[in-house]
Image (tube, helix red, strand yellow):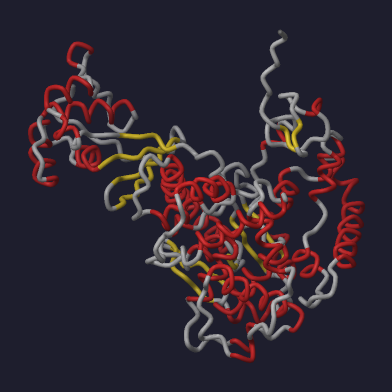
Amino acid sequence: MKQFPIARRENLIVEELPDEVLVYDRNTDKAHCLNQTAALIWKNCDGEKTKGDIAALVQHELQTPISTQVVTLGLEELAGYGLLQEDAAAPPRERLSRRRLIQHLGLTAAIALPVIMSISAPTAAQASSTTDPCIANPRAEGCPCTFDSDCDSGNCNAGTCGPALRPQRKR
Amino acid sequence: MKDTFAKATGKLVADFLAGAWRLQPPAFDLSVAEFEKIAPILLSTGAGALGWWRVRESTLPGCAAQEELHQAYRLYILEARLNQSRIEKVFTVLRSFGIEPILIKGWSAARYYPEPGLRPYGDIDICVRRQDFRTAEHALSDFDPLEFKLDLHSGFAKFGLQQEEDLCARSELALLGETEVRILGREDHLRIVSYHLMREGAWRPLWLADVAAALESCPRDFDWSYCLGERRQARAVRSAISLAHLLLGATIDHLPEAQRFDQTPRWLIPTVLREWGTAKPSMQCRQAVPMWSQLRYPRGLLSGLRHRWPNPIEATTTMNAPFNDLPRLPLQIGNSLLRFGSFLTQLPKAWNK
């Protein structure tokens, strides 16, 4: 683990919300959501602060006890998502497991653990009127059809390809 | 039976979205089961983030739909940021060619919401004067179509607005990031979002929320006689305003009595509710698979034709007919014939694509 971790800033779009930070990585076209703890750890990775300094600052901001182990876990997660400048992940022997940390700190402290979540487009959240999976594959689920044979699933239901139906077991 | 079910679901969507565009939406009073029933519709029509805005202060234990809407909200916030930088680039390039574009719909509709991510937009709709269209096309030809989903329009006729010079003269500048972008004046914006909603058959609830948000942002000096001046277009605009008021509870106190809709035709609200309550509205299916593509792959042709049958709102708007209680069937037939004619003229070009 680097002693003075540095946050990656380039090619990222960062949007700060009241209780979380959203990050869009233009290199990978992936979006992440950092909870307050993860966001504060990330924000303080300026190449000048140690894990201990970061832990003290985050503890002050959140008014909750934060150990260096929590910061280590946060740094590992940030590195895993490519949000630190260099690979700051700890060697395997030092790696922390979230479960072990919760056991060690207790459930109350677990609330303050850093969490990074990937944001994926919910089922149909991409509401652009131009994106169309049916042009790429007119036989896909959700595409218009007339007969069962028009669908990959073999199930044309009310003019739309439905999911594949389970074959009936013969008794 | 199916129709009644769709209308009941549509009514739930309308009740849920009532006032959702406001900074403080009204209290949320749907049951979890009702909410979970309409959440997929909100997500598939781009109203997921708006849905989350409505329920953000409610606790719905174990409700996966609430988290899905929250994800949509997060995603749209980032998309809005990405789109903003794209719009800035488009304006910079067009201005370097001596063209002053006007941004319509999309961002210019989103700015009436409390947060830009609440109103997602996939395309960047840009209007340029008719004489500038070819130059603009050339100027934007280097943009990667996968990154920049640009919809470049020649003039404003497609949106029922004819007086190009008036529109440009009444347009205004708004700050987007570090760039001033040109948008329509408030009156023209309301006309365009209303007309667009009606021309598309009002199938997307978010578009009616656009009308409601613009309507409630009208300043005291809003020029209603100009906004509702063009007689033919005014019918559609008045109907859209009426729908925003009746279905979503938009305030119309500042709308002069004389400009209000006397009586909404009896088919208007049921048509909207039917569209909103259907898992796959016809217009959405129609846009998803163009007719020329369906001819190439004839499977699904029958349902494709069915999706092309216009609903009464689309037919009335595109045929410039009055919104009254007379039967809509002649207008629906007329609209279909017109579109079929236009399809035939474009077919050879599409076939060669």
Q: Quadrant of residue B337?
A: bottom right
Query: Closest to the observer: B267 or B113?
Result: B267
Number of numbered discs overlaid on the protein picture: 0
On screen, A81 above or below B227? above
On screen, B7 above or below B98? above
* Residue at the front extreme, as displayed: A171
Left or right: B108 in relation to A162: left
- In the image, what residue occupies the spot 52% across and 59% down? B92
Residue A9 pos. (x, y %): 31, 40
Left or right: B40 in relation to B179: right
Residue B353 pos. (x, y %): 82, 40
Residue B29 pos. (x, y %): 43, 59
Query: Closest to the observer: B317 or A76?
Result: B317
Point out the image quarter for the C terminus of chain A. top right
Residue B324 pos. (x, y %): 78, 77
On screen, B35 above or below B24? above
Q: Quadrant of residue B224?
A: bottom right
- In the image, what residue occupies the spot 81% across and 40% down? B293
Query: Closest to the observer: B52 or B229?
Result: B52
- In the image, what residue occupies the spot 51% across and 67% down? B181
Residue B159 visible at all: yes
* Residue at the top extreme, as displayed: A171
Q: Quadrant of residue B152?
A: bottom right
Residue B148 visible at all: no
- In the image, what residue occupies the spot 15% across and 22% down? A103
Point out the image quarter for the N terminus of chain A. top left
Query: Closest to the observer: A37 or B25?
Result: B25
